[in-house]
Image: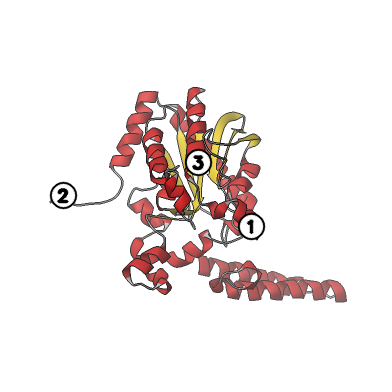
Amino acid sequence: MAAGGYLDFEKPILELEKKIREMKEFASGEEIELSSEIVSLERKLQKLQNEIFSKLSRWQRVQLARHPNRPYTLDYIGHIFTDFIELHGDRGYADDKAVVCGFAKLDGQKALVVGQQKGRDTKAKLMRNFGMMHPEGYRKALRLMKMAAHFGLPIIIFIDTPGAYPGLQAEERGQAEAIARNIREMSVLPVPIIITIIGEGASGGALGIGVGDVLLMQENAWYSVISPEGCAAILWRDQAKAPDAAEALRVSAPDLLELKVIDKILPEPTGGAHRNHQLAAQIVKGELLASLVQLKQLSTQELLQRRLDKLRTIGIYDEI
């Protein structure tokens, strides 16, 4: 990560933005007319951004998905929903703050919102456990998803996690069972489920709240059975080969759309969602509303059959 929250491949953008900022300050302080020069530099900046972000590698997209300024679940909730009321606890052990759950309104339509939440500073990161859910987090999410199904409310999910928490205590409390139960139960919930991958979608940590009818994915998010670093450590015993692993795993949104793992790629503002939270949220909101309209036209039987068919057609394989 370069200075100022920029990634290494964004350094040319950083330098040009700094030059524009300095020129504006100089023109204002000296009362000199430099508007034509500033406009020329701004056009050059736009062209440079388009060039860099039109040919990102899979590893660079992984880096963008992890950008510390990227909008998280609570950011999207604040921009997209109204009347959000967060609910807590799994009624069995504890409240897992790595996942946020609550009821809200999407343009007046009531819905359950579930999403993994990371922290921005050290204190928040520790409180949110870096977005890595414990078993009680999956059980909290399932408890509220069943409540939403009871009242016939759609479920909207945001995925952003480096994986389920791998600690000993999580395993003792049934991490694998909690994820497996969620996958089974979500496959038969009789209400629309819309999932959006807004950052990282790693392994079972994502799948534990990742079964639904429509799977949307932001263009600079990633989704895979394992992180590039984890894959590199297993195959080459060298995490420095993570960029090679990202290419081999095909973790990017275009790859997953081709494999029919996801249904649609959501464009991001130029430079990534972290450059304009509000615009990124507007794009997500529009797709959520469009998906809800389509899903509400289906009967419960059609909805569940469509969900099952979707799971069965994921991926490309050969039968011998």
Residue at the left extreme of this rendering: 320
Residue 141 is at least partly visible in this image: yes
Give the residue pinned by disc 2.
319
Q: Which residue is tagged 1? A: 120
Query: Which circle, 2 or 3, is nearer the viewer?
Result: 3
Q: Which residue is mark 3?
A: 136
Residue drawn at the location 51% of the way across and 28% of the way down: 148
The span from disc 2 to disc 1 (Cα, nearest Å) is 46 Å
Left or right side of 163 for 75? right
Q: Which residue does the image show at 16% across and 49% down from the upper left?
A: 319
x, y percent for residue 100: 57, 42
In front here: 293 or 47?
293
- Disc ID at residue 33: none
Residue 33 located left or right of residue 314: right
Label 2 residue SS: loop
Amino acid at the residue labelled 3: Glu
Q: Residues within 10 Å of mark 3 (few under 14, many from 20)?
A: many
